[in-house]
Image (tube, grey):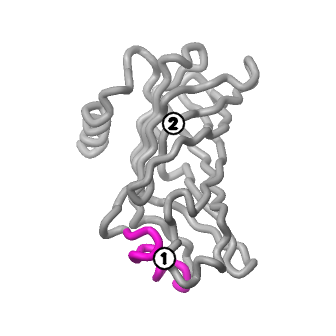
Amino acid sequence: MKAVYGVIAFFFFSLPTISFADEPFWLVDKEQSVIAFSAEYEGDQFSGNVSEYEIVVRFDPEDLKSAAAAVSFDMTSVLTGNEMYDSPLSGEEWLNTIKFPNADFTSTSFDDLNANTGLYTLHGTFTLLGVTKDLAIPFSFASQDDETAVIDGSFQLKRSDFGLGTQSTDSKDVSEIINVTFHLIASL
């Protein structure tokens, strides 16, 4: 439990532009949640997940102006389960986890896509390999009861926007688009 409070304190102090006033603070259950990705290599699809990450979310559908989110991904935990992909993935030509051990997302705003449907867009900046780009991430937020919610979403990353794999001789064989999906179970 001490580690959870340490992570919360880290995000509160390292993200001064995000206001965490009175909105609900959602704690993500990592045992039930998944952040996954998929792409193609030589026309064959492969997939994997990010098993280590820290998330801070303040979200109230009735007060989107005050909502905020921050995620830090441990890039050493990005795995496909296939040694052929995993071995080079952390290397200098791809994720370069020695130099860039984390990728980070910080929200800038939330939009309601269609009133009372539970569909939203999260806007923010994503930093991978030292390159920061704006992202718009559509997601759904479904309250299961007063204290539990399911958050599902997906987005695409363009490898060349971040220089991901551009130095690799295999780069031409890997799809330019990386699909990212998430299924989060959160509680207050």
Q: Which label belongs to residue 43?
A: none
Q: Is mark 1 on a helix, strand or loop?
A: loop
The residue located at (46%, 28%) in the rendering is 68
Question: Residues under labels 2 and 1: Cα distance?
Answer: 27 Å
Q: How many labels does the image show?
A: 2
Q: How crowded is mark 2: few (under 14 residues within 10 Å), some or many (20 or more)?
A: some
Q: Position of residue 174 (x, y in %)?
A: 64, 75
| Mark earlier in primary sequence (2, 1) | 2
| Residue 53 visible, this angle | no
Q: Give the range drawn in magenta.
A: 83-96
Kind of residue at badge 2 = Gly
The residue located at (57%, 44%) in the rendering is 184
| Residue under pointer 1 | 167
Q: Where is residue 79 in the image (x, y as percent from the top left)?
A: 50, 70
Kind of residue at badge 1 = Gln
Left or right of 95, for residue 185:
right
For the residues bearing labels 2 and 1, Cβ distance under 8 angstroms: no
**Is residue 26 a member of the stretch shown in magenta?**
no
Foreground tag (2 vs 1): 1
| Residue under pointer 2 | 124
**Viewer-closest of 171 and 121:** 171
Q: Position of residue 153 (x, y in %)?
A: 65, 43
| Residue 56 visible, this angle | yes
The residue located at (60%, 49%) in the rendering is 182
Q: In which quarter of the image is the N terminus?
A: top left
Left or right of 52, for residue 156:
right
Q: Position of residue 53 (x, y in %)?
A: 42, 52
